[in-house]
Structure formats: C-alpha cells, structure tokens
Amino acid sequence: MSLVAAAQSPGGNFEEFQGPFPGWRNLKTFYGAAGDGKADDTPALQHALDEVTLHKDFCVLYIPAGTYRLTTTVKTVRKHHADCQGIAIVGDSPETTVLRWDGPPDGTVFQYDAWYSKISRLAIDGARQARVALSYGPAFSTYNETSDLILRDAAIGILFGGGETKGQAENEVLRCRFLRCTEAGVATANFNSMDIWVWYSRFEDCGHALFNRAGNFHAWQNLFLRSRIADIGSKNLMVFSFVNNTSIGSGRFLDFEGGHTWGSPMTISGNRILDPLDDFPLRLGNGGPYLVMDNIFKLPTGSPRQAAKMTWGDQTFVGNTYTITNAVKENGRFRRLAEKLAAPDAIDTNPPVMPPTPPRQGRRVIEVSAGADAAAIQKALNEAAALRGQRPVVHLPMGIYKVTKTLVIPPESDVQLVGDSAGEAGTRLNWAGPAGGLMLKLEGPAVATLRDLNLQAPGASAVLVENADQPGGKIFADQLNVSGPSGKPVASTSALRVNGLAETDVQLRCLQGNGNSGNWVEVIGGRPVHNQVSIFNGASSTAMGQYNVHNGGQLVVRGVYHERSQDTLRGLYLADSGALAIDATRFSYQTSLQAPLVAVDNFRGLFTLATSQLQPVGSTNTCRFEFAGDGTAADVLALDDLFWVSEPGVTSEKIWLNHAKPPARGGLVGCNMNSNVKGLMKDGFGFLENMGNPADVSDAALLRHLAPLREARVWLPDEVPPHTTNLRLHRVMVTGGKGAVVEFRAGN
C-alpha cells in the first residue's frame, strides 16, 4: 500500500462561477478596450479602475476574454478611506483573459490598492520583463481574496508590501498558478504583511514558491514543482504552518536561514517531499519551536543526504516517514516519536489532483432590484425554491437592502444567494426589524450557497441554520467574517456558535472577525460526536474568549492570528467540558495581572496549545496559564510554544500556575522565551524548563494531545447523502448583537 499525506485530493463537486451580471461593467463594451494583444489597452483599463475604485454605480469590473496589452502600470488609487473598499476585478477565466506586460523592464503590471475586495480569474503575464505581476498596496489592506489567477514570467508573482508600502494582511491566495517567477511566486515584505493564506495553488519553476522578507504566511494543500532554490524560505520570523503540501523535484522544501536569536513557532505537517535536489530538504535554521509531524520524505536512491537538519532550539518530530536510515541531523532540544522507515517504492509519487478554476454552469438567474425590500427578496427565494435540483441563482446587486422581517430559505432549497461584494459598499442587508429578531433563517437540511454578501443585524441575530445535523452532513465556510456585539461583556453571546452538532462536519477556512463583548467561536456538544469542527487559518481581534467548548464540544484550530486591546479579557476561558486543540497560532494581547491568557477552571477534557506565539502588546506582563477548581478531569498541554517576555525573572513556575486541586494533568513541554528588551536574556533567547508529572509529559501524553491535530481532515464541498445538510458560505461578512450572530443548530 502506498504512503500518501492526508487530504491530498479535493472533493468532486467544486465551486462554480456566477456572472457576469447586468450591473457589472464590461471592460470591452463600456470602456472600449480591444483585447486583441496589439492595441494599447492601458488607458481603457486605467479608466475602468479609476471608476470602480469609487464604487458609485458599480463595484465589479468584468474583463472578458482577450489579451490586453499594457505599457505602463495600471493601478487602483486609494485617496480616501472608502475608496477601493469592497470592489472586485473579475475575468472570464485565467486561460482566456490575459493582462500582458509590454512596458519597461523591471516594472509592475498591476498595483492593487484595495481592501475588503477580490481579484479573480485573470492571467497576468510579465513577458519576462516585469519585476512584479501583482503588487498589493501602498495603503494597508485586509480581507482580500486573490483567486484563480495565473501569474507568469515575472520576477515576483504577488508582492505583499515592500518599499513605502504598508502592511497587507488577511488575504487568501486561492487556486492560483505561478509559472517561472524567478525570485518568488508569493513574497511578503512588510512586518504587517501577515496572515497570507495560500491554498490549493500550483508553483512551477520558481526561484522560491513562497518567500518571507518580513511578515508571515501559511501554506496549505499546494503543489510545488521544481523550485530552483526552495519551495519556502524566510529571512524573518513570525508564526507559520505548512500543511498537506506536495513538493516534487525542488531544491529544498523549507529553508529558514540561520543567524536569528529569536523564535518562529511553526507546524510542518502532512507534507510529501519527493526527490529533493539539495542536502537537507528541511533545514531549520532559526530558534523554532517546531512541530514536524506526519511528513513523508522520499530521497533520491543512493543519496548521502539527510531529510532534515534540526536547529539549536526546541523541536518535536512525530510520525514522520523516511526512505533512509539516520534521516535527521539532530541538534538542540528535541523529542522524536513514532517515526517510520519505508521503502522508496512504497511512497506515492503522483502529484495531487488540484481543484480547477470554478466553471460557469449557466444556472437560472433571478435578478432582484437594487435596494429591494424584504418581500421582494423573499419572493425571489421562494421562486428559487420551486427550482430545487437546478441550483438557481438569486442575485442581489450592489446596494443597501432594508430587511424588516426574517428572510427564510426553505429546507433543501439549493438556491445560490449571490451579491456583488461582501464589503459595506457592496451588497449590504441591514436589519430594520424588531430588536432581538433574526435576519436570515435557513430551514434544514440546508443545501444553499451564500456568496459575496454583507449582513448587518445590530441588536439582532443575523443567520440561523436549523436542523443541521445528519450523518455525512457538511457546512463549509470560506472567508466568513463574523463579529459579535460590543458593550459590556456577556458570556452568553458568541459571534459564531456550533450548537449540538454531532454528525455534520463544519470547516471554517480563513475565518475572520471578532467576538467583541462575547466569545468569538463557541462549540456546544450534547451527545457523543462523530463529526469534526475545524478552523483552518484565520484572524480575529478582541473577544471575551476567542474559543470556548461546552458540554463535550470539540474544536480544532490551526494557523490563526489573535489580537486584543483590553487588559481585562482572557484569551481562553475553559470552565466546562470538551476538547480544544490549537496550533500555529499567535496571541498578541494587552496582558495584565488580573486576567491570564489561558484560564482553566473546573474544566473536564483535553486542551492542547502547540507551536503558538504568546506575546504581550502594550503591556509587560508575560502571558500565563492559570488553573483553578477541580483538576481531576483536566488534561492540558503547552507544547513548543514561544513566550515573549518584557519583564525579568520569568520562569516556568511563573507562567504555569497549576493551583487546581488536585492538580490538572499535562504540562509545559519544549517551550522557550524570547525578548527584544536589551540585556534581559542572553542573546534574547532562553529555554523554559519542562513542567508536569513525568506521566503527563510522556510520549503517550504527547501523542494523546496531538491526536486531534493529526486526525483533522481537510476537505472541499462535495456531494452528500440525500436530505442532508450541505451548506456553503463564501465571503460573507456578518455583524450582529444578540445571542449568536451566526448559529449552526442541530434542532429547530
């Protein structure tokens, strides 16, 4: 049986493309572009970009099939706060819509200064002359999608930051192809260019596929082919995760250059590294900590090379497979568990099947007038429900819609409710009904799709999905952005609540938002669970608690950034029962003596926090764990975490305060600390002593705590059994102010 990393093949029922709609502007028919590869289309495209930037009459620029010759950089220019907020640049397809550079050497083809926006379905061709195909900035951006692009024959495919550019954060790079980018396919070049999430993308014959000068990225489910230097490289450090990628014939898979005296928590898991060309395809050159887990290393036959070269910091190697003995050059403080040796011919060397650009399916479209009332929207939804099985589209063009009573999508209606943009200036539904009401209810089983919408329900709930729990059910959300109510902290409120699901899987990819005065994400159990609730990449700001599990709820979180500006709020408060596993996550918190980062009080269950960065911001108190109450059933592990310190005398005893009686199981393992305060620690780095009873930090304990992360499945929407939940949300931005803003509920 061949060995293959988990989740290398996508599902079968992929996304589909809807559009162009009547309200979109067409670059050829409205602005006179030729698209013949000969005429200079720079003036036409620049005129269109100048107008879409203002989003007065439209917010989507459609570029039909053609080759558009560009002689100078085209750009969106943000002069005011609202400019470029919630726009979209959309081509026919990356195979047929090409922006081709014919300008001076080392130029930039497209400078995209947008936020809460999307650019999709284009090819940007540098013609072996341009330095950058697509450059984000110069103003700060967030909540962008860069999808289904081909970026070729430039030095850099996509540049996030650089020069006088500010940070470019929270951008999903999805299903893109990078061809012959001589420096890098994706480059981050600003310390605030963080949370770049690269998914299902293909890199061929690039210098680096991904390169970090400053900032960070996470790379999941990608294919790297023949990277000349390395698939992934970095000169600066933050928090990273590289999961379920395949590398074939590259120089190295990962090369983090040495010379640093501060850490970079990182998870490297589920990757296949096949036939690398250089020694040490995995070269860990900085202080870590690292979690290297369930990777497959196939080295060329007869090669004297090793698979990995450890660093001088903390690292845990778990479940990796090698085709040679003595595969790791050991160094530093490390643990190695459950690793295997396999014959080269037992390794699956086939590249993964990558999801294609979503096709246009020609669905029936029911067009709603801009600014229509709730009755008109409901009429369209009812008309779509009568077309069950045909996946009809109800399109809400750019505008503000006043919703005075609950909109209802009936059970098993496969309607696609589609707007023009999730930005506030795009397709916005405002709740104008009674306080405490509900804007949108999906009666279950729900099989609808929501896309490119902005839902605002102050004083009310925004979305409720009922009867959502059936064997084989799936709820998939990509770039859902959900925020809870502001005001006095209320423990009973949550931005997103998963309530009682035991069968339906919930996958939240690139989740964003905040909890404000309540929880950000809450998972409530109730019976033995057979499903998986997971967050893969994301970012949030202030919350009373970022995550909470109750009544046996289970949640896996990987590769998320958190920040908080109130010193009275905890990052995590576990006081009920369940299982929570987190890795490759950063907590940037205004810490205090009153509120620990993690509070565990009478908790019954398993909690794992691995390869995370715990950093005070605007304060000096070191992040800490505090345990209270009955610790009999509490099992907590901090593994390979990095604690930033700004105060002298920090030891394990000061950040691991196990006051529960009896003490909670678990411990502090493989963690270290760093400081940018001169003279506080030698070389700005120090090891933290492992803590916990010997049985609690044993190999068996580590494997028990890592099991939720190792077993977490990554999937794409697919067919499900009849009469079963199959809900999809793509770029939906939601705010609310009561109970749960968005709730997936087992019952009615």
Image (cartoon, rainbow, N blue to C red):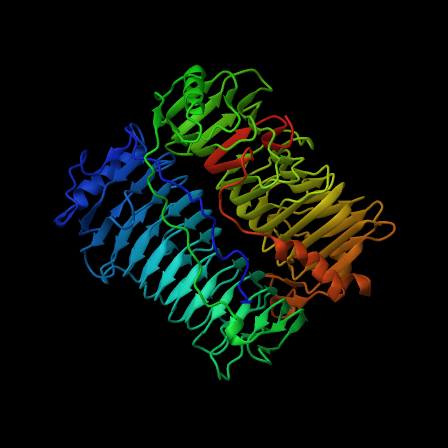
Q: Is residue 685 above or below residue 305?
A: above
Q: Is residue 123 left or right of residue 244?
A: left
| Residue 693 percent across, percent down from the top left | 82, 62
Is there any visible trace of residue 569 in the rendered image?
Answer: yes
Q: Is residue 384 above or below residue 228?
A: above
Task: Residue at 49%, 47% (x, y): give it.
Answer: 716
- The C terminus - image quarter: top right
| Residue 331 percent across, percent down from the top left | 62, 76
Task: Residue at 55%, 76% (x, y): give it.
Answer: 343
Number of residue marks: 0
Q: Is residue 285 above or below residue 542?
A: below
* Residue 31 figure quarter: top left
Task: Residue at 20%, 51% (x, y): give it.
Answer: 72
Is there any visible trace of residue 168 in the rendered image?
Answer: no
Q: Nearer the viewer, residue 486 or 359?
A: 359
- The N terminus - image quarter: bottom right
| Residue 630 percent across, percent down from the top left | 85, 46
| Residue 685 percent across, percent down from the top left | 63, 67
The single residue placed furthest to the left in the displayed view is 39
Q: Is residue 638 left or right of residue 328?
A: right
* Residue 23 figure quarter: top left
Q: Nearer the viewer, residue 697 or 679?
A: 697
Q: Nearer the viewer, residue 210 or 150?
A: 150
Q: Is residue 128 left or right of residue 183?
A: left
Q: Is residue 705 above or below residue 248?
A: above
